Amino acid sequence: MREKRDDSGASRIAVIAEGAQMNGKLRSKAVIRIEGMFTGEIVAENEFIVGQNGQVEAKIWARKAVIAGLFKGDIFVLDKIEITSTGQFIGNLLQKEPRLVILEGGRFKGTSSFVDDPAHFPFTLEMELPVLSESGGSVIALHDLKI
């Protein structure tokens, strides 16, 4: 009997490793983990993670997020966002519901807001998520990296 394939992305991970640099657009159903440097736009249909050594300057749409390194930009989160004790967030955060957690030592500089009516949040992961702008750079969709 053939096993049913899990396409949720929870068991897959897309990594930009420490020492790597990327400029462009990234979209994935897998967990996205940045340990290197990334500039651009990301649609993370699962979890978006900036590792402790990661540096990200971007516009992000994600189900949930963990910031353990440096993040600069705008992020739209459907679920929880956590800034760890080593995390630095500089920018604007819009949440579907107020689920921001900042651990002792974590830094937040910017704005944090949530919508009064979650039904009016600007996007859902079930819809065709934001068309990444055509401002140049690479578009990469990573779907089949297994951990």
Image (spheres, grey):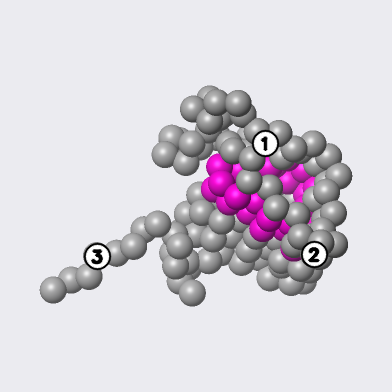
Q: Does dot 3 land on a helix, a strand or a loop?
A: loop
In the image, what residue occupies the spot 67% across and 36% down? 94
The span from disc 3 to disc 1 (Cα, nearest Å) is 35 Å
Q: Does any portion of residue 4 appear in the rendered image? A: yes
The residue indicated by pointer 1 is 94
Choose the circle earlier in sequence order: 3 or 1: 3
Instruction: State the residue at coordinates (47%, 54%).
Output: 29
Query: Cα distance, mark 1 to mark 2?
Result: 21 Å
Tag 3: residue type?
Answer: Lys
What's the distance in space between the residues labelled 2 and 3, CA to CA?
Answer: 39 Å
Q: Which span is picked out in magenta?
A: 56-83
| Amino acid, disc 1 | Leu
Q: Is residue 27 left or right of residue 134?
A: left
Is residue 75 within the magenta segment? yes
Residue 45: give its label: none
**Residue at the (71%, 34%) spot, across then down:** 113
Per the image, the residue denoted by label 3 is: 4
